[in-house]
Amino acid sequence: MNTRSTPAYLTVVALCVAVLAVSSSAPLIAFAAAPALAVAFWRNGLAFAALTPISAGPRRAEVRTLHSREGLYCVLAGVALAAHFATWMPSVQLGSVATATALVATQPVWQGLIAATTGHFRHGSGPSRAGWAGIALAVAGVAWATGVDVGVSTQAVLADVLALLGAMAAAVYTAFGERARTRFSTTTYTWVCYGTCAVLLLVVCQVAGVRMIGFDGRTWAAILALVAGAQLLGHSMFNYALHHVSATTVSVLILLEVPGAALLAWAWLGQTPRAAALPGLAVLVVGVAVVILTGARGRKGVAAPSPL
């Protein structure tokens, strides 16, 4: 075997596994017979527990430096991540998997707008003309897809709004994560994020009286699949791939989650995407791809893992 071809082969396998893992996220959330906030807590709490042995062992010296400014960014990223899960995950249960996944994929659009309005994140690198064109395409796609839901039900519109809020929160999470990652490894960074996120979601669940236990076996299996798949395996495979391909390539491939989640929801849950919304979702994905591709020109770095 040609050893030089092995890394490329493993990278392709890693990317395929990662896309499949994150594509399963929304269908599993919709499948779980439990409140979305409870699922969000267990997803992050169990992931935090799974990463604790590593943080307490090999990463112990790094954890001791969390009192730094970058450590604060880790915590703030966790706050934004809690806002993301508290909005996007209910949107999946209230509306369709296809629309919720597509709308939350607008995260790079909101990151571009953050870069255009403040120099604190992304070092002031706002969108180019092509980037603004991509943002316009994505916004047009959002208007098209969500306009269809206006005629469906108030619940569908609420689901769309929550998904968009989830995308905005994910952009803030990534922006803080970029600052935190200048000092901390992926493991330490995500360990703090997941822990902070889990604590906040637990408080919200307790205050709101959300049921946390007593679910059936299928629901617990779905929660464990979320932790092992999208939360840990998906992130790990994407981070492995980032050592061999550009962050732009990974970001564009993450968009495959949109059709992937829709196909899984159709085959597994019987959710057939509304035909009138499909062109809008397609325009949305194209617009986001343009934003990612144009935003990468002249910029290098590793993106924070997708929270999905």
Image (spheres, rainbow, N blue to C red):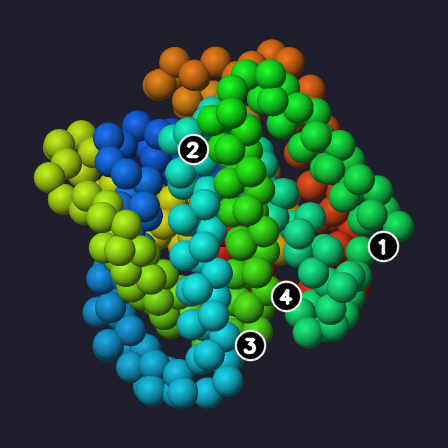
Q: Are marks 2 and 4 in contact (CB under 8 Å)?
A: no
Residue appearing at x 48%, y 39% in the figure:
19
Q: Residue at x 60, y 22 (%)?
A: 150
Q: Which mark is residue 118?
A: none
**Which mark lies nearer to you, 2 or 3?**
2
Disc 3, SS? loop
Q: What x and y, as percent, mark residue 26?
A: 41, 34
Q: Counting residues from the N terminus, which is met first, the one under dot 2 or under dot 4?
A: 2
Q: Is residue 55 visible?
A: yes
Check disc 2 and report its element: helix, strand or loop.
helix
Work out how far the residue at label 2 is from the one at label 3, CA to CA, in angstroms: 33 Å
User: Mark 1 against mark 4, which lies toward the viewer?
Assistant: 1
The CA span between labels 4 and 3 is 10 Å
Residue 89 higher or lower than 27, as above or below = below
Look at mark 3 in the image and give the residue it sits on.
182
Name the quadrant containing residue 279.
top right
Which residue in the protein does label 4 denote?
Answer: 301
Q: Secondary structure at mark 1?
A: loop
Q: Label 2 near label 1: C-beta < 8 Å?
A: no
Q: Residue furthest right?
A: 129
Q: Identify which amino acid the numbered label 3 is placed on.
A: Thr
Residue 41, above or below 194: above
* Three-letter residue code for mark 4: Gly
Residue wearing tag 2: 92
Q: Describe residue 235's horizontal placement relative to residue 226 as left or right.
A: right
In this view, the mark in front (2 or 4): 2
Query: Of helix, strand and loop, which one carries label 4?
Result: loop
In front here: 171 or 243?
A: 171
Badge number at residue 128: 1
In the displayed structure image, the side of residue 52 where residue 238 appears, left or right = right
* Label 4 with label 3: CB-CB less than 8 Å: no
List x then y, in percent, for residue 245: 60, 53
